[in-house]
Structures are given as structure tokens and as C-alpha cells.
Amino acid sequence: MSVATTVSTVFAPELFVLVATLLLVGYERRTDPALGPLARRVGVVVGAWVLAFAVYQGGPGVVGTGVPGGEDFFAALGLIVAFGAIAIAWRRLGWGSLVPLYAALLVGTSLLHLVVVPLWDASSHVIYAAVPAGALVAADRRFAPLVAVPPALVWSRIATGAHTVGEAAGGLLVAAVVLGAAFALDRLPRSSTAGTDPR
């Protein structure tokens, strides 16, 4: 297996988004221990991931595969369901404001993804690495090493032949639009203790 293929596999969208989500869940809980047990939060995320997987796997059987965007359509739809569920759970249980903002950002990303990909095969790997990485850096600059992942994916998607230069770099453009809009609307997750050690 080549290095480029390994990078694409290790940072597959479903894995990177899950890891980024769990990092933010742990971070939010750590910055405010009064927000409730971590195990329940992780349980909500895992349950949401099961829902996303069910939509992704079951959608083609229910609706058929002739939808615009094909497999990417059901992947994005699964993320919309998952992050909608996460946001609802966080709000109802009063677990803090960071994860709901992040969840809304991922729902918005997935909605844009549903529109863009059928017209232009921008790299999902790059989009779903850049948006979570940007959101985590907005929450706390100590997550800054994560911003190395999207450029590595641009390279790997081109090197493996999965995308053209325009499609791979286009993933960065789509992510920049999402993050720029969230910044302009002040909808990025930001911690009041960002950049400080909460211990």
C-alpha cells in the first residue's frame, strides 16, 4: 500500500469526523466538569454514528441508487441525521454550547455537500477533514496540528488518482466557504478558556 493510499485510508471522512467529534466532546467536558459524565456524551455520539451508518447502508435499498451524488448522497444524509441527533441531545441535556455549534457546522457542510458533489466532485475527504479541523482550532488553538490533515489529503487524493487537482483543491474551497460563513455569522465553537490549560 502506498503512502498516499494509507493517508486516504487513515483519514477517511467517517473516521476523521468521528475522531474530531470525540476530541471536541472530551475538550468541552474537560473545560467544564460540571457538564455531566463523559461516558453518556460518548454514548450519544456512538448512537448517532450508528444512525448515520444505518442511513448510509440502508438508504440505497430504500430509495435506490439513482440519486444525484450516489453513495456520497447517503453519506452526507447520514451525517445530517447523526449531527442533528447530537445537537438535539446536547441542547436537551444542557451539556454545553461547543458541540451543538460544531454539529450545526457539520449539518451545514453536509447540506452544501449534497448540492455541490453532484455538480462538481469536490473531494469529500478534504471537505470533511478541513471543516472539523477548522472548528476544533476555533475552539482551541492547541488543535492547530490538525490543520496539516487537509493539505495531506489534497496530495493523497491526487496521488491516488481519486480526484483531479481541481477536485481535491475544491474540497478546500468548499470547506473555506463553510468555515468563512460560520466565522462571519459567529457560529464557530469557541471556548471561553481557549488556549488555556483548564486543569
Image: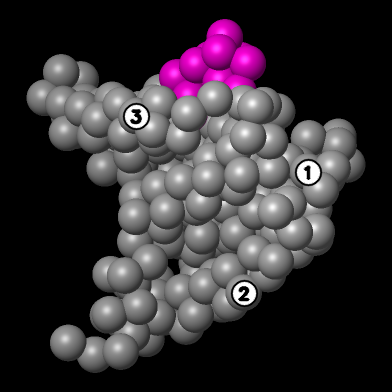
Residue at 81% across, 48% down: 193
Residue 64 in percent (x, y) is at 16, 26
**Can residue 58 be seen?**
yes
Does residue 139 appear to the left or right of 61 in the view shown?
Answer: right
**Which residue was labeled with disc 3?**
43
Q: Residue furthest bottom?
A: 2
Look at the picture and state if 29 lies above or below 148: above
* Magenta stretch bounds: 83-95
Q: In the image, 176: left or right of 192?
A: left
Q: Quadrant of residue 46?
A: top left
Q: Classify 60 as above or below 174.
A: above
Q: Position of residue 74 (x, y in %)?
A: 30, 34
Q: Give the SS element for disc 2.
A: helix
Residue 43 vs 109, above or below: the answer is: above
- Colouring mode (rainbow / by chain / secondary structure / one colour): one colour
Residue at which label 2 appears: 145
Amino acid on which disc 3 is placed: Gly
Q: Earlier in the sequence, mark 3 or mark 2?
A: 3
Given the current orientation, which residue lies at the most extreme left position?
A: 61
Observer able to see residue 78:
no
Between disc 1 and disc 2, whose residue precedes? 2
The residue drawn where x is 59% and y is 38% is 29
Asked whether 134 or 43 is in front, the reply is: 43
Residue 171's x, y, as percent? Answer: 55, 61
Q: Which residue is mark 1?
A: 191
- Residue drawn at (34%, 55%) of the image: 15
